[in-house]
Image: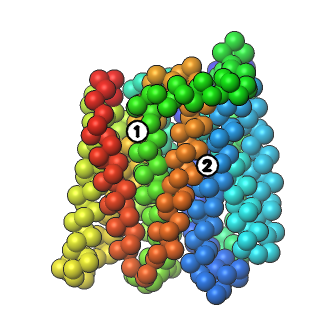
Amino acid sequence: MKTPSQAEFIAMMAMLFATIALSIDAMLPALPAIAAELSPGDTNRALLVVSSFFLGMGLGTFVAGPVSDAFGRKPVILACAVIYAAATVLSYFAPSLELLLIARILQGVGAAAPRVVGMAMIRDLFKGREMARIVSFVMTIFMIMPAVAPLVGQGILLAGGNWRTIFAALLVFGVASTVWITLRQPETLGPDTRRPLQPALLWRAFKDMARNRIAVISTLCQTLGSASLLSTVSSQQAIFEQRFDRVATFPLWFGFIALCAASGSLLNSRVVMRLGMRSVITTSYIAQVILTLAILGLDATGLMPAALVFPAHVLWSVSVFAMMGLTQGNLSAMAMEHLGHIAGFAASIMVAISTVAAAMLAAPVGLAFDGTQIPLMVAVAAFSSIALGLMLTVRESTA
């Protein structure tokens, strides 16, 4: 099989990652319809449709990474694609919210491969700041998907379909991305570099990670960043509807936010080679904390002019997405710098812990929604402040 160009490889990885974004963001315009049909007595429960997917993805990554280290990257991607497809069909036919949440957890399990195995494939081929640059390009394309996904969901709803039809679109997209990588991308992990799936070896690899201070801090920071993003995504539709009375234009505004935020990943791809990963991450957290506290303080005290409340919220939302583009890829690259010999396992553990923990942190934020953006901003300020404190303890020259 002919090796694809770097541009095609980046595009394939971006499409794999985009499966995750589409699975989350295409559902946002449908949350009111899901709540009305499956949970009319407690509409906030519909927000769990987003966090349950994250939970399943976190659980799936505990398995996907180590298995890909033992049997190769592509077989795991194919197996998880089958799980994703089956769970998507189950979601389409779910008669209750409880069954839909179970199906979404399984769908998240299937989506584990695009995230963790995709990251391991990148590490197989690149390392250090070069890996961070490649991840930034992937994330730039990936961040555009949230701009399109809500419009896809809204378009399906407006075309006379219902929220269930969105799952049909997810199925088509998932199959297309899997076929592309199956036909075009050679296996990146040769038989001579695979690690047998043995408990003793997995435990040894886990201890290698636990002793790596950068990997531990990176995992904690990724958890807090993912919690910030998940909390924001879960609450945005309700905020636009109840706080700003803009539910009809929500997909357009969300798309605008995502497109603007894509500049974070693009900017990182340009500056990380010169400034270093640690500097970019720390500066991003500082900016996020300052902006969040400033807007929160003005809004909570009523000092912000009424005409600026909505533009300020849009600006702040862009900053949360951009922060992810400037930090998450760098955090992964920092941690993986010295873990190339267990790339699949390391990516699996980091993504699993950060995703499951982020879902647990974000769920109470969504349930605390009170008709305003204040609970969300308080949570993001707290998450970003803790992440900043952790990064200030990092002094590694390679970062």
Q: Which residue is mark 1?
A: 217
Given contact means CB atoms under 8 Å apart, are the residues at marks 1 and 2 in contact? no
User: Which is nearer the N-term, disc 1 or disc 2?
Assistant: 2
Instruction: Look at the picture and state if 4 lies above or below 370.
Output: above
Q: Secondary structure at mark 2?
A: helix
Distance from disc 1 to disc 2, alpha carbons, whole Å, reads 18 Å
User: Taking 140 as reference, is 264 left or right?
Assistant: left
- Pointer 1 local density, CA inside 10 Å: few below 14, some 14–19, many at least 20: some
Relative to 284, say whether 10 is above or below: above
Where is the N terminus found, in terms of image quarters? top right
Kind of residue at disc 2: Gly
Which numbered disc covers residue 103?
A: none
Residue 358 picture location, percent across and down: 51, 55
Query: What x and y, as percent, mark residue 24?
Result: 59, 59
Can residue 236 be seen in the rendering of this structure?
Answer: yes
- Between 314 and 371, the one nearer to me in the picture: 371
Tell me which amino acid carries mark 1.
Ile
Find disc 2 in the rendering and name its residue: 58
Question: Mark 1 falls on what kind of element?
Answer: helix
Q: Quadrant of residue 69?
A: top right
- At horizontal 80% and vertical 75% (from top left) the residue drawn is 95
Q: Residue furthest bottom?
A: 41
Question: How many labels were placed on the picture?
Answer: 2
Q: Residue furthest left?
A: 303
Circle 2 packing at 10 Å, graded few (<14), some (14-19), many (20+), is many
| Residue positioned 25% across, 60% down in the render | 291
Vertical arrangement, residue 280 with respect to residue 236, above or below: above
- Tell which of 137 and 391 is nearer to you: 391
Q: Position of residue 195 (x, y in %)?
A: 68, 20
